[in-house]
Amino acid sequence: MGFFSIFSKEKKEELNKGLEKSKESFFAKLAKTVIGKSKVDDEVLDNLEEVLVTSDVGVETTLKIIERIQSRVSRDKYLGTGQLNEILREEIGNLLMENNQESLSDFEIPQLDRPYVIMVVGVNGAGKTTTIGKLAYQYKNKGYSVMLGAADTFRAAAVDQLQVWAERAGVPIVVQPMGADPASVAFDTVKSAVAKKCDVVLIDTAGRLHNKANLMRELTKIKNVTGKLLPGTPDEILLVLDGSTGQNAIEQAKQFTAATEVNALAITKLDGTAKGGVVIGISDQFKIPVKYIGVGEKIDQLQVFNRQEFVDSFFPEGGM
C-alpha cells in the first residue's frame, strides 16, 4: 500500500469524526435521490447532480463526476441504485488521484542544506495562524528545528496569536513592532533561521480581503525577499482555506492562485461543517495538492491529506 499504509487507526478515527457532519448531510440527500428507484436513470442522475452541488463539490467538478457515471450507465443499462455509493466512491477516488501529486509522508520535508521555507497565505479567519502553529508542532515532533515569522504586522491580534502558538509548540518566533514592513520580518526570519541552521521556516502573512491589489503586491514582495536570501524559496506557498465556507473557499482559491504562485493547500475546520465536499471540488479544480486538512481544534488535529483515506472515510463500505 506504500504511503497509504502508514495511516494510523487513531488518525482514521479522527478523520471519520471530523467528516461526520458532511457524511450525514450527504448521505441523507443521496438517500432521497433513489427512493422508489431500482436503477440509475436520468432522473436519478439529475437528482445526484443537485446533491453534489448542494454538498459544495462545485459545479465544474460535479459535471465531471456525473459525466463519468453516465458513461458507466451507458455501458451497463441495468446499473442498480444500490451500487451508487460504490460508484461514487470509485469515481471521486479516481478524480482525487488524477488531480493531486503524491505528498511526502507524515510531515516530512525534503533533505536540504538550508531551511525549508513555507510562506502561508489566506484571508483572516480561515485558520491561517492556527494552521501555522499546528504545523510547527507537527514538524517539531518529527525532530525538525522550526522558526516562525510574524509578518502579519497590520493586526496586533495576529502577532499575539502567533506568539501564543509558538509558545505552545515550543518554537522560536521573530516579531517586529506593529506596522513594520512585512518583508522586513520575513527577511529577519529567514536570516535568523540560516544562522541557527533551522530546518523549517513558517512565515505568517496578512490576511486582509483577497481582492485587495496592495495585499497581493505585499505577498510578492515577501516572496522576493526570501528568494534573494535563499534562491528557490519559498519552497511552499501554502494557501489556507476555511472548509466551512464552502463555495466561498473556492472563490478565495481562485483569487489567490491568480495573484501568487500557490503550490500547496490546507483546508481547515472540516470537523464543524457539513461542507466537506468542498475538498473534492478544490482538489479537482486547482490542480494544486491539498496537503493538509484540519479536523479539530487541538494542536495535533492537523492531518496530512491522504486521498484514499479521505474517500474511504467519506464513502464507507455500504454507506453510512
Image: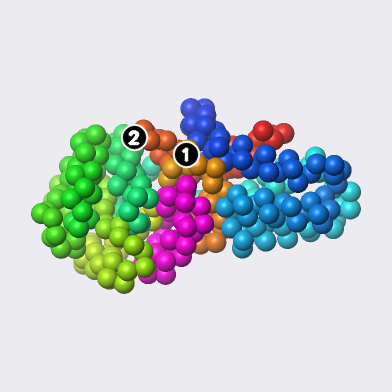
Task: Tell me if residue 299 comes above or below residue 209 in the rendering.
Answer: above
Estimate how packed mark 2 is, as few (under 14), some (14 to 19) or many (20 or more) residues with alpha carbons within 10 Å. some
Callout 2, which amino acid?
A: Ile
Residue 265 pos. (x, y %): 43, 54
Vertical order, 172 against 282 (above or below): above
Q: In terms of depth relative to the viewer, which is nearer, 14 or 273?
A: 273
User: Magenta residues: mostly which secondary structure?
Assistant: helix
Residue mark closest to the camera, 1 vs 2 = 1
Residue at image position (32%, 43%) is 130
Q: How is the image coloured?
A: rainbow
Q: Residues within 10 Å of mark 1 (few under 14, many from 20)?
A: some
Residue 10 visible in the current orientation: yes
SS at mark 2?
A: loop
Q: Which residues are magenta?
A: 241-266
- Pick whichever of labels 1 and 2 is earlier in the sequence: 1
Q: Is residue 211 left or right of residue 146?
A: right
Task: Give the Cα separation between the discs numbered 1 and 2.
Answer: 16 Å
Query: Mark on residue 272?
Result: 1
Q: On screen, 301 above or below 112?
A: above
Q: Is residue 260 magenta?
A: yes
Residue sitting at x 51%, y 57%: 247
The label number, if any, that marks residue 299 in the structure image: 2
Name the residue: 38% across, 35% down: 297
Q: Amino acid at mark 1?
A: Gly
Task: Return the x and y of residue 310 as percentages of the image width and height.
Answer: 56, 41
Task: Assign the N terminus to one quadrant of the image.
Answer: top right
Q: Which of the two residues, 181 or 202, is positioned nearer the viewer here?
A: 181
- Dot 1: what SS? helix
> Which part of the image, by quadrant, shows the C terminus?
top right
